[in-house]
Amino acid sequence: MTMGKKYCIGVDVGGTNIKSAFIKDGKIIKRVKILTHAEQGPGTVVDQIKNAIQTFTKPISHIGIGIAGIIDSRKGIVRYSPNLAGWTNVRLAQTINKKFKVPVKILNDVNAICLGEWKFGAGKGYNNIFLFTLGTGVGGAAVCEGKLLFGANGFAGEFGHSVIKYDGKRCTCNQFGHLEGYVGARYIVARARRRMKKRKSSLRKYKKITPRIIAQEAKRGDALAKEIFAEIGFYIGVGLSNIISLFDPEVIIVSGGISRAGKVLFESMRKTAEQRIMGAQYRKFKIIPGKLGDDAGILGAVYFAGNFSTSST
Ligand SMILES: [Zn+2]
C-alpha cells in the first residue's frame, strides 16, 4: 500500500489552530494554518476545517483529519473532544465528504502522529512502537506487531490517564494519580514558578514560561530547569515501565517540543524505567525523540485516509 500518486490533504485540528497541508507521495507541498475558533462551537469549527481544505484547488484523492479526543474512526464520528467546546457526536467525516466528494477519514490526533512517525519518521522500520506526546495533555499511541492499536472502542493509548500513584492527586479527568497530573504542561510550569521564587535561574528572564522554554533552558544547562526535567523523566519513566512490561516495544518515541530537553529527560526516563521493569537486562528498547514535529500528525492522517478502510464515507 502506498500514499498514491495523486494529491491528498491532511488536516490537524487543534484547540487553537487548524493546520492543513497539500501532500503528494508522503511529502508536504504546501501548508496552511488558520484559527480554530473553538469557542464558537462545532458549526464554526467545521466551517474552518472546510476553509483549511478548500485553499487547495487541485483535484485530490482523499482527506485525512487528526483531531484530539475520543474519535470513532470506523463511523467517522467525533464522540468527544476536550479542546473543542460542545463537540459531542459530531459526524465530521460525513460532513466533509459531502462538501468535497472524496473519501474522508478521521482519527485521534496522537494516533495520527504515531502513524506519521512510524511510516515517515523516527519509527520507520519498527513493528512495535509506543509514542507519547507531552503538552497540555499527555497523549499516547502504539503500533503493536505492525498494526496501529485502536482497541475495542478505538480509545487505546491514553498514557496520560494511566495510574502512576494509586492514591495520587486528582487529575483533570477527576480520577486519581494519573500521569498527566504530574507531567502535564500546567503542572510543569507551576512547579518551575514556585522554585524560581527562591532560586536563581535563567528562566527568570522570561515573562511567560512554557514547557518548551524550560526544556530549552534545561538543554542549555540551567540547574533548575534540569532538575524539573529530571523529575518529569522520573514520573514518565514510572509510566513507561508499565508500558514496557505490557507491550514490550522496540522503540519509544517522545513527540513534541519538550523532547528538546535532551539528555537530562531521556536519561531520567530510561533509568527509572529500567529500575522498575522485570528482566531489564534481557529487554532491548530505545527511547528517542520524534523526527517530524508538527508534520507527523498531518502525514499520519493522510496515510490513514489512504490505507485504512474504516467507514463508508
Ligand atoms: Zn486522568
Image (tube, helix red, strand yellow):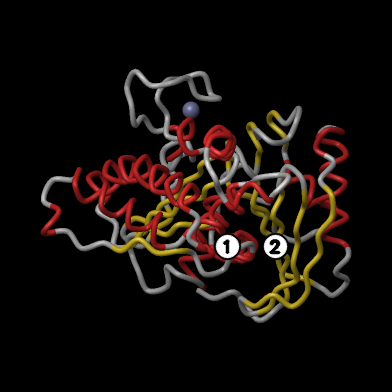
Residue 61 in picture, x, y percent from top left: 72, 69
Q: Residue at x 34, y 31 (%)?
A: 164
Residue 22 in picture, x, y percent from top left: 75, 71
What is the number of the mark on residue 12?
none
Q: Residues within 10 Å of mark 1 (few under 14, many from 20)?
A: many
In the image, residue 279 sits, relative to residue 238, either above or below, namely below
Q: Residue at x 88, y 65 (%)?
A: 55
What is the number of the mark on residue 10?
2
Q: Which residue is mark 1?
A: 300
Residue 6 in picture, x, y percent from top left: 70, 78
Name which of mark 1 and mark 2 comes first in the sequence: 2
In the image, residue 118 sits, relative to residue 3, either above or below, namely above
> Could you tell me how far apart the alpha carbons at marks 1 and 2 are, in whole angstroms?
8 Å
Residue 73 in picture, x, y percent from top left: 58, 45
Query: Which amino acid type is shown beneath numbered disc 2?
Result: Gly
- The answer as to whether callout 1 falls within 8 Å of ligand 1 is no
**Residue 296: quarter of image:** bottom right
In the picture, measured across the screen, residue 91 lies left or right of residue 288, that is: right
Q: Residue at x 65, y 78 (%)?
A: 27
Q: Residues within 10 Å of mark 2 (few under 14, many from 20)?
A: many
In the picture, measured across the screen, residue 96 lies left or right of residue 227, that is: right
In the image, residue 71 sits, relative to residue 4, either above or below, namely above
- The answer as to whether callout 2 falls within 8 Å of ligand 1 is no
Query: Which amino acid type is shown beneath numbered disc 1?
Result: Gly
* Local secondary structure at mark 1: helix
* Local secondary structure at mark 2: strand
Q: Are marks 1 and 2 in contact (CB under 8 Å)?
A: yes
The one of 168 and 222 positioned closer to us in this rendering: 222
The one of 143 and 193 positioned closer to us in this rendering: 193
Q: Residue at x 67, y 58 (%)?
A: 64
